Image (tube, grey):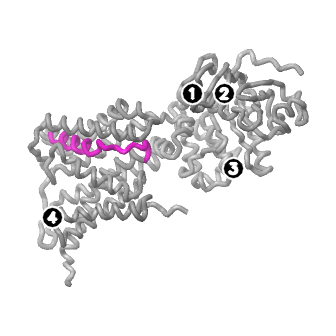
Amino acid sequence: MMAPQAPAEPLISVEGVHTYYGKSHILNGVSLQVAPGEVVGLLGRNGVGKSTTLKTIMGLINASAGRIVYEGRAVTGQPSHKLARIGIAYVPEDRRIFRLLTVMENLRTGLDRHGVSEAQKKKLLEKVFQYFPRLAERRHQAGGTLSGGEQQMLAIARAMMLEPKIVLLDEPTEGLMPRMVSQIREIIEVLHKDGVAILLVEQNVPLTLAASQRVYFMEKGAVQHHAAAAELSVDHPVIHKYLGV
Amino acid sequence: MEIPWDIIVIQTVNGVVTGMILALVASGLTLIFGIMDVVNFAHGELFMLGAYMGVVTLAATGNFWLALVVATLIIAALGAALQVVTLRPLLGRDPLYTILATFGISLVLQNYALWQFGPVARKIQEPFTGQFALFYLQYPWYRLLIAALSAAIIGGLYLFLKYGRYGIWIRATTQDRVMAQAMGIPVPWVHTGVFAMGAGMAAASGVLFGPLVGVNHAMGLDWVLKAFIVVVVGGMGNLGGSIAASIFISLLEAYASIWVSPSQAIIVSSVVLILTLLFRPTGLFVPTPK
């Protein structure tokens, strides 16, 4: 199987990034690229550094070596609020919605930015409420009172408020009912059609293969393999090798 | 024993007035703690400097209300500068560092005030001297006004936090600093803004309370001590709890001073603090954890 060509003009490029948690060496030279509008899966066993890769890109953990290039300029070490403002959104594994803020207030954390007109805000809200009508119904309800699936919707909707060029999506289907999983699958498709790139970390291999154009496989804190999603299936030897399923 | 209703009513009014001023001081303190996890030992000195700034502006302009606004703005700006220079570099460090830093700031500011203004207490002239009859007392309208103004400032803060764009930023930062930053909220500047707001509120209370007591370099000490007590009794970082605790403790002290001297009545707040720490360390005015 031939590794697919890396994008000629990537939106984001992670180049040999190393990250430590205290003295533990977590990322050991991770390199990957995501093109504009592309959905890229990041697969690997638990603890190989997938979530840490997303956190490092988002500036939540400092990279000790290597660099991250976004739209042609190095953004390594930039604070996460600046990265959010230039179009990088992050949906964490544990959702981390603001539990005491209402649904609407959660959305406003991303919506109330400089340079966004009232008309734009209205349009963005309408769009999100069209995708997630449950959130529209519960717009005045505290985030902490929503079900797990609704909280995941809110976490994604909140990220969409930033009008991102790329969404770092960390295990969005974890702990969700099958009906919710297919809804998450649909929203990934919608974002893709809107031209938003997604770097998707998932344990759900069928969903990742169906949603992504390319897939990176991580092991021991580094990317070990890289393939076109269309060439893979759940029982492919590469999947067995890196995920042991 | 006959209940002295007239004295109880007078002491209720006194307790509410003092409670509202204390609530204004404590709101700034609890806001800073709730958002930044910083126990601001310099808060009393910001209160004191606010009062001095009021003295200086009042002497220059003769206008109390202008003095109130100018003192609030200048001390808020000073608070912002202090946060950027001393507390921002300590973000993420052990809380002991920030405690030492704010304690150091308090010593510097107190000694600066002593050097600049001397040990003799200054007086701020109240903006009006009208009184009304409250049983056998001629009660100054100004005391009621400062309670109302304090309530208005705290109410304004509540509305700002509840509905304002930056209020939502502040509440989001309180709940999850990391995720707030990931949503594009400039958390370091939110911290600076909150510290400035807390400092400004301390300064406003200093100017408002100035006419009732003398302004001197050590005046912040009593107030900040009491503010710390209400912040703990109200529940650390809980704005509503601090306000409720301010009024609760001030009323208790006011009632106690019917039977004992005011200096002995202060013991009441210490007793409430000790009982709270022993039996409900999360604070009296926070919901019971389920």
Q: CA distance from mark 3 to mark 2?
A: 39 Å
Q: Give the label, 2 or 1, closer to the camera.
A: 2
- Are labels 4 and 3 assigned to the same chain? no
Residue at 80%, 17% (x, y): give it: A5
How many C-alpha atoms fall within 10 Å of the one at disc 1: few (<14), some, or many (≥20)?
some
Point out which mark residue A27 bears: 2
Going by the numbered disc 2, the residue's amino acid type is Leu
Image quarter in which the C terminus of chain B is found: bottom right
Q: CA distance from mark 2 to mark 4?
A: 70 Å
Circle 2 marks a residue in which chain? A
Q: Give the label, 2 or 4, closer to the camera.
A: 2
A157 within the magenta span = no
Going by the numbered disc 4, the residue's amino acid type is Tyr
Cβ–Cβ below 8 Å for labels 3 and 2?
no
Is residue A162 toward the left or the right of residue B100 in the image?
Answer: right
Residue at 23%, 55% (x, y): give it: B146
Q: Earlier in the sequence, mark 2 or mark 1?
A: 2
Q: Earlier in the sequence, mark 1 or mark 3?
A: 1
Cβ–Cβ below 8 Å for labels 4 and 3?
no
Q: CA distance from mark 1 to mark 3?
A: 37 Å
Is residue B99 depicted above or below B282 in this figure? Answer: above
Residue A147 is situated, as x and y percent measured from the top left of the image, at 67, 54
Q: In this view of the protein, which residue sits in the foreground, A50 or A39?
A: A50
Cβ–Cβ below 8 Å for labels 2 and 1?
no
Is residue B27 depicted above or below B217 in this figure? Answer: below
Q: Give the label, 4 or 1, closer to the camera.
A: 1
Q: Which residues are magenta?
A: B34-55
Point out which mark residue B139 bears: 4
Going by the numbered disc 3, the residue's amino acid type is Pro
Cβ–Cβ below 8 Å for labels 2 and 4?
no
Residue B81 is situated, as x and y percent measured from the top left of the image, at 33, 31
